[in-house]
Image (cartoon, grey):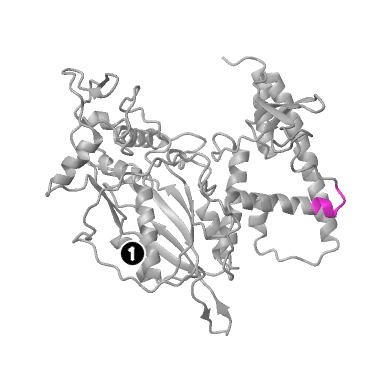
Amino acid sequence: MPQPAEAPLEAVRELAAKERVCTRPLFRRVVDTTTGEVAVVSLPCQSTRASQCPSCAERARALRVQQCLEGWHLEIEPVDKDDDRSQCDDEDDEGDDSDDEERVVRSTRRRDDVPDLPRLPQDAGTLGRVFEGNDGRLYRPSMFITLTLPGYGRIRPGTGVPVDPERYDYRRAAMDALHFSKLLDRWFQNLRRCAGFKVQYFGAIEAQRRLAPHFHVATRGAIPRQVIKAVTKATYVSIWWPSLDRPKYVQDTPAWDGMDYVDPQTGIPLQTWDDALTELDKNADAKPAHVVRFGSQTDAKGLIAGVPETDRAVRYLTKYLTKALAETFATDGRVELAYDMHIDRLYAEVRFLPCSPDCPNWLRIGIQPRTVGPGMEPGWCRSKAHSREHLGLGGRRVLVSRGWSGKTLAGHRADRSEVVRQALTSAGIEVAAVDRMAAQVVDEDGNARFEWAAVIPGAGTKAAMLVATILERRRWRAQYELAKAMANAHDPPVDKQFGSLQRAGR
């Protein structure tokens, strides 16, 4: 039973959500080594999940809306101002990128059951073609595309629940979800070869009601629909892994002897990952453990800048970014019993199938993972792909090409802050220093002036600090509204075409 002190904290959190303030901030103690002053500050949690923090999640979604809009219908090639993109912040903050798999040299001949695709001469540009309309105006259309996975069994209309769960192919559904990101990477490679220019994209992975991931993507430049459909039909990924059909250790778990994982009965070391791949390479009749393909449903439409349909497409593309796959269709955090059982059956497959060569689930197959160590146990891989919340999708939810807008997500965030700062400065309102208490601020000796340390305050202190943050946010918002009103009193009317999207990102 919760303690009495927690009740006001929950009430304050509800108020914080209404005021668009982080409901679960991180508290830090900051010591000014120059003056000796000690302060406790709160930092936003920056979660992208509304179930964890609706304020931070909606702020992150609004930032993605801005990013999508800025790069979609460009008329001038973007200039990449970010030289170091090794740590690309176009990834979700909850992403977990696994190590690349070892590449085994195999035949590059395409499968006999997929068509070959032509390769067009490549243009170095990213903007696509310009068309002249009947009105004499020039248009540079772009595309909005939706890709889906195939069916795994009949689904009851409007429910997402299989008609016959016993005949529904949960195993294939789980494998497709685990390797969906690889399929998307291959699709973009093929699309660029067939489009004839460096196609740039902004896309989001979402869940269909049946829980299979599907992909909405905005691409810059016009691409014929027949090309998109041909590329989708011809794209596949073969997973060249040892066979996954016969789990060897379902009850007993292989034991760690200090160097290898061994059979719990005989003590004989399990086959290593390298030996398993060598055996696979020597087998001339070997087939891939799994082949991932798209389904037959592919939707592609051309859109131009400045029309309501483009506005709606951006909203649709970013609609579910604040939800995990398993909670996409939950109402008030609840799901119906039949749907909940559908999630459980898919989770049962996702939990024990390997997600990478380093996954502990290989021990269940009777093979040691590529990288071994003590503490590995099937069903307890650290990748979020195996969680009931994500159901196989372990990587990024948002995929953005590096040439989309010429900025990283941090760059877009800085732009938004700069707009607010300029508005306040123009209105004569004092703006707090950007580097206030920042770690890069140094003292006279060149040492860090501010020392940061984590702190866990009590429920009463948390509530009091959260109230202070709410009041501060109200003051900032009032100042910003005043600054905008003063600017509008002197400036000419502005184009309100994308006003709704701009208001969503305030």
- Magenta segment boundaries in residue numbering: 423-429
- The residue sitting at 67% across, 18% down in the picture is 458
Residue that badge 1 annotates: 231
- The percent position of residue 216, horizontal first and vertical second, equals 45, 55
Q: How many marks?
A: 1
Instruction: Determine the residue positioned at 73% across, 52% down.
Output: 418
Crowd rating for badge 1 (residues with CA inside 10 Å; few <14, some 14–19, many 20+): many
Is residue 99 shown left or right of residue 438? left
Residue at (80% x, 40% y) in the render:
475
Q: Quadrant of residue 68?
A: bottom right
Q: Is residue 333 left or right of residue 483?
A: left
Residue 148 at least partly seen: no
Task: From this view, report whether residue 144 is shown above or below residue 287.
Answer: below
Q: The N terminus is located in which quarter?
A: top right
475 or 238, nearer to the observer: 238
Q: Where in the figure is residue 316, as x and y percent of width and height?
A: 51, 55
Residue 163 is one of the magenta-drawn residues: no
Tell me, yes or no, if residue 55 can be seen here: yes
